[in-house]
Image: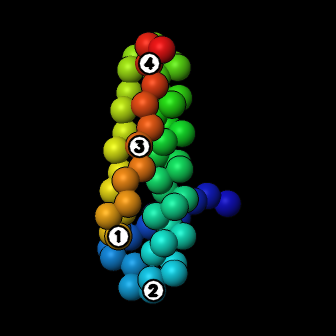
Amino acid sequence: MGRRKVEIKRIEKKSSRQVTFSKRRNGLIEKARQLSILCESSVAVLVVSASGKLYDSSSGDK
């Protein structure tokens, strides 16, 4: 059983849209962290929600 291709379009139901945003935001930040570790690079991610809330993540030299 494989994954099915997701059609990229706006999600009309507000609650479903928020859940998808949260899951994909966390996934994006995790992928950025993995890229930083694997490639020894500095990575920064900024995500702004529809309500204007800012989410940020960075990695690299400490």
Residues at circles 1 and 4 in contact by the CB criterion of under 8 Å:
no
Marking on residue 13: 2
- Image quarter in which the N terminus is found: bottom right
Front-most of residues 6 and 10: 10
Q: Tell me if residue 4 can be seen.
A: yes
Callout 1 crowding tier (Cα within 10 Å): few <14, some 14–19, many ≥20 = few
The CA span between labels 2 and 3 is 26 Å
Residues at circles 3 and 1 in contact by the CB criterion of under 8 Å:
no
Find residue 14 and report its horizontal and vertical position in percent: 45, 83
Mark closer to the chain start, 3 or 1: 1
Q: Amino acid at mark 3?
A: Asp
The residue tagged 3 is: 56
The CA span between labels 2 and 1 is 15 Å
The residue tagged 1 is: 51
The CA span between labels 1 and 4 is 29 Å
The residue tagged 4 is: 60
Mark closer to the chain start, 1 or 4: 1
- Classify mark 2: helix, strand or loop: loop
Mark closer to the chain start, 2 or 1: 2
